[in-house]
Image (cartoon, rainbow, N blue to C red):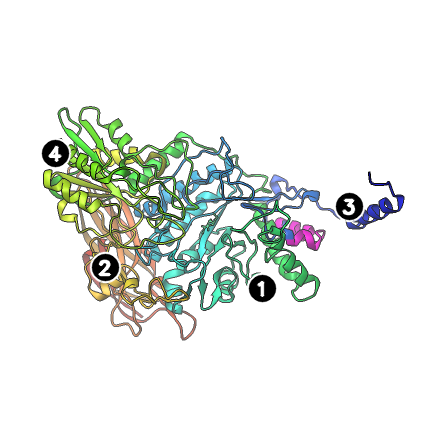
Amino acid sequence: MMRFSFKKSKLLLSVILCLHIPHIIGQNKIPKIQLEKSQISSEFIEAKIDSIIAVLTLEEKVAMTHAQSKFSTKGVARLGIPEVWMSDGPHGVREEISWDAWSEAGWTNDAITAFPALTCLAASFNPELAEEYGFSLGEEARYRKKDVLLGPGVNIYRTPLNGRNFEYLGEDPFLASSMVVPYIKGVQKNGVAACVKHYALNNQEHWRDKINVEVSDRALHEIYLPAFKAAVQKGNTWALMGAYNKFRGQHTTHHKILNKILKTDWKFDGVVISDWGSAHNTKEAALYGLDMEMGTGTDGLGTGTVNHYEYYYLAKPFLKAIKEGELSEDLVNDKVRRILRLMYRTNLNPNRPLGKLNNKEHYQTARKVATEGIVLLKNDDNFFPIKDQKGLIIAVIGENATRNMTRGGGSSQLKPLFEISPLQGIQKRYKNATIIYTMGYESGAPVYDKVLPATLNQDSLYVKAIEVAKKADVVLFIGGLNKNHLQDSEGDDREDFDLPYGQEKLINGIYEVNENLGFLLVTGNAVKMPWISKTKGILQTWYLGSTAGLAIADIVSGDVNPSGKLPFSFPKELNDNAAHTFGQISYPGDGVNQEYIEDILVGYRWFDTRKIKPQYAFGFGLSYANFKISDVKLDKENYTKKDQIKVTLEVANTGNREGAEVVQVYIGKHKSKVKRAVKELKGFSKVYLEKGENKLVTISMNVSTLGYYNTDISDWSVEDGTYYLYVGNASNNIVKKIKFELF
Ligand code: GLC
């Protein structure tokens, strides 16, 4: 037994005292952390932050700038400053994860509402709905006691192979900007920080942690940054996540240029959080804007140094560099100021609402986003809607009819309280018809980083499917991708553009015995469609979350008229896509570098300029009704650069039922002195019309939004001269073109 030594205990006591003396002596200087409800002005908060920073030790400040667990950072316990708790993801609150491992924590109170993936939200072209979506999701994050929601993702859709396109808002920066702002505002109304991600140029998953992207300043500012800029300047996002990849040789999570753009040019006053393991250097992290370092490798419970939070770049190495005078203490003070500001907006905000979880309103929002985002791509012979009637035999074939789609896909995967499958939704809705289901094909269980083989005999599944199709009056094939590894999932990209798991062969086989065939595509990406002539109807149904089956049945039955429009182009062939036109260096890169050679011509900008016909165009979507856009007028013929352009037009519903049309306004410079796309989306409006109804619609935009990023002056320029206004209901269906002049 250790002999009691007075000498040792005296030494121990003096060590403890000297550690705490500053606090004991300064006790009266300790500020009250809590704010009164009336004290939430920014002036008061900034003053409060000053007073807190003044009494924090250097160790306490550094500790706030890096992870203490998988999804949390330290507070300051002795002062009552809380920890910051974060959670994925962009379309639902992820299940609780273990303190130190990626495994689920095994809680039983963390099931939530799974909302449709963001491509579906983008396809709704409904910014008001985006705010409702963000608010509902923010309520769930608040109820789950999360201070930061790690979403939305706004990386631009550059290649149909990107494993995470389903998490993002499509190929057009104006659409992505228009949808991300209300989403963020909705989330943050709950006192939960949105964390727009991944800043920037994380447009693929292949080699995401190391690929160095080379892209022009024009494409950077005109295509890849606008949604982030809108999130900061219009959405007032309280957090932003750095990306894994490099840009011009430096890691984007602590990047000199990107940090200047974000924190100096855009005046971002929030917190930059790394992606998990995306920090690579203490000095760069300190100097170039990283405020909170989170980690993939985490070992806070072990005693080693590898992956230990205390050895993160913004932990002991940062503390040491400051103590040794290599880095200024001002750097950590700015980080702590931002973190405390985030806290006064979230867990220290005395007016923060309580949040809600799994309620009727959230299910209604999820279902509304799903039905408004589903896109009717093909409808020959009015294949859809399918009327529920006695004696009708509907064959539902395909693994995606029953597969759980909220699992898989990587960090955005969810544990919903329930998930209604397409088959369940169809069975619930069709009370009179006879529904027969067979799997048709099998893919294998969703595992993050490997492809598990199918377990059933594929031939017997195929034979069974043909038998079932033979007996049916109508066949609904429900297939697509499925968020398995290499199939719409984080961590890597798809390896080809085709439908996997033998679906094409199966569709052809079904067609041989039954031509009354419709395809419900469950994907977050475009796919190759060599089978298109074998189908009468095609619905792009995305990943729809908890109410998937209800929304699909709403549309298939005609209870709801589809109104979604594609937020990205579907190329016929992969090599029709801009990123796949310039060889490996363009996509996926050579393993070290990658060049965005198509530059500003992403998506429809490329198809327009190269006069390539896509399979389905950006902004395209059919309806069960018919609409007519007419009487398109500009308020002037000539504009100055300070003007606002006002477009007026009429939309009529000439169909035989209610519906909604998305009127799109594109603008293009005639004979520009620089390379520019033929036209760019500058405005849109979703118009709801009863049968026979017509409405006058006004869409306005500032002339200043017609500029291009002028690399000669590193700023935006608006050219004088002739422009064209294009109005239509798809990027390749323009009903009116009007010339106007700019002076
Ligand atoms: C992942 C993702 C990021 C996610 C984070 C935490 O690597 O890139 O989007 O929020 O790690 O799971």
Q: Which residues are magenta?
A: 45-62
- Residues 347 and 275: in front is 275
- Residues 424 and 149: in front is 424
Q: Earlier in the sequence, mark 4 or mark 2?
A: 4
Classify 10 Å Cα crowding around label 2: few (below 14), some (14-19), many (20 and above). many
Q: State yes or no: residue 54 in magenta.
A: yes
- Residues 293 and 459: in front is 459
Residue at 59% x, 39% y: name it: 350
Q: State yes or no: residue 153 in magenta.
A: no
- Residues 387 and 103: in front is 103
Give the residue type that dot 2 points to.
Tyr
Compute the Cα span from label 4 to label 2. 47 Å
Q: Nearer the viewer, mark 1 or mark 3?
A: 1
Element carrying mark 1: helix
Give the residue type that dot 1 points to.
Leu
Residue 450 placement, left or right of 190: left
Give the residue type that dot 3 points to.
Gln
Q: Find out whether the residues at labels 1 and 4 contact each other: C-beta distance under 8 Å.
A: no
Label at residue 287: 1
Quadrant assignment, res 9: top right
Compute the Cα span from label 1 to label 4. 67 Å
Q: Which residue is mark 2?
A: 726
Q: Earlier in the sequence, mark 1 or mark 2?
A: 1
Q: Which residue is mark 4?
A: 470
Compute the Cα span from label 1 to label 3. 33 Å
Element carrying mark 3: helix
Query: Which quarter of the figure is the C terminus placed in?
Result: bottom left
Q: Earlier in the sequence, mark 1 or mark 3?
A: 3
Quadrant assignment, res 36: top right
